[in-house]
Structures are given as C-alpha cells and as structure tokens.
Image (cartoon, grey):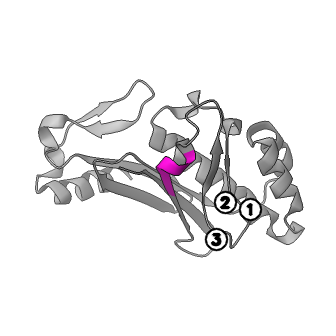
Amino acid sequence: ARGLLRQLLGSYLARPPQELRFTYSDHGKPALLEAQNPHGLQFNLSHSGEMMCVGVTRGRAIGVDIEQVRPLNDMMSIAASFFSPRENEMLAAVPADQRELAFFNCWTRKEAYIKAQGQGLSIPLDSFDVTLVPGEEARLLAVRNTQPDEAARWTMQAFAPVAGYVAAAVVKQV
C-alpha cells in the first residue's frame, strides 16, 4: 500500500517515487517534506482486507478509512465502548439486518475524522457524533469540547467502493 501511495504522490509531483521523503507528526501522521511539496499536497491512506483507499488534497487536511463489512460477535459492546451515546441510540434503532453496515458506517466516518485531525486516538471517539444510518447523508453532527462550529468546518463523504466494503473521507474546509 505504501509503495502505491509513493507512486501516486510521485505522479502528482512529477518526481521519481523513490526520491520522496516523509516526515511524521507527533501522532504518526505522514506528510511530504515541505521542500518536496510545492503544491501543499496532503494525503491519507487506509486499507482493509484486499482493498485500499487513498485521499489526496491541495492544502486541506484529509482523512480516509475503509473497512470490510463483516460479522462481529461483539459489535454492540465495541459500539458501547467507543461510540457516543447518541450514536449508540441510532445504532440500536437501525433494523437488525442493517446493523453491521450501520456499525461500519459509523466506524469509518469516525476514523476518517480523527485521521484528518492528525491527532490519532488522542481524540476520544465518543467526543463527537457522526451519522450512521444506511442511505443517510454522511455528516459530522457535533463535536464536543471545542469551537461551537467545529462540525461545520469539515466535509464528510461516504462511499462503497466495491460490494462488502464501506469507506469515508473527511476534508477540512478552507
């Protein structure tokens, strides 16, 4: 996956991929060295199963996540541990046959947001709310303990790249 990312970034920058050098934030988010990045490219990578997802922007923070939708025996206990109370209520209200998809919708959207922030799991997953109902527009609904308009500063897109997978991308607005 990293080799493909390097090739993609090299093509954007018209540079040989092997020449690209990376730096890492305190929380491990990679970035191109500033001297090699005249366009201010920001990027993020995720992989699950046989799929990977890459997001690239010019000058805007981005986070992506992809997950293979699969049965989880402890799905509701994972949700209780990591999702917000509002998200747990929404998940419980989803028909049982759509609950796995709703769970992974929530998970990918939350992961994409914290990856865009570049702060890793220092942001508690239950400190913000996202939509999760299948077919509902992907949105960051609320972020607690921050600026009142924080949720409006981000755009969220959800998509299913192939059957059996869901993905999300979150980009900071200018």
Which structural element holds mark 1?
helix
Q: Measured from the top left, where is residue 22 in percent x and y?
A: 25, 36
Residue located beneath label 3 in the image: 164
Q: Measured from the top left, where is residue 160 in percent x and y?
A: 57, 71
Residue located beneath label 1 in the image: 102
Q: How far apart are marks 2 and 1 (CA)?
A: 5 Å
Q: Distance between the residues labelled 3 and 1?
A: 13 Å
The disc labelled 3 sits on which kind of residue? Gly
Residue 152 colored in magenta in the image = yes
The local crowd at label 3, few if under 14, some if 14 to 19, many if 20 or more residues have their Cα within 10 Å, is few
Per the rendered image, the range of residues in magenta is: 151-155
| Disc sitting over residue 6 in the figure | none
Q: Main secondary structure of the magenta part?
A: helix
Which structural element holds mark 2?
helix
User: Image check: 156 left or right of 97?
Assistant: left
Q: Which residue is drawn at 13% across and 45% down?
A: 38
Residue located beneath label 2 in the image: 105
Within the image, what quadrant is residue 28 found in? top left
Within the image, what quadrant is residue 103 found in? bottom right
Residue 137 colored in magenta in the image = no
Q: Measured from the top left, where is residue 142 in percent x and y?
A: 65, 45
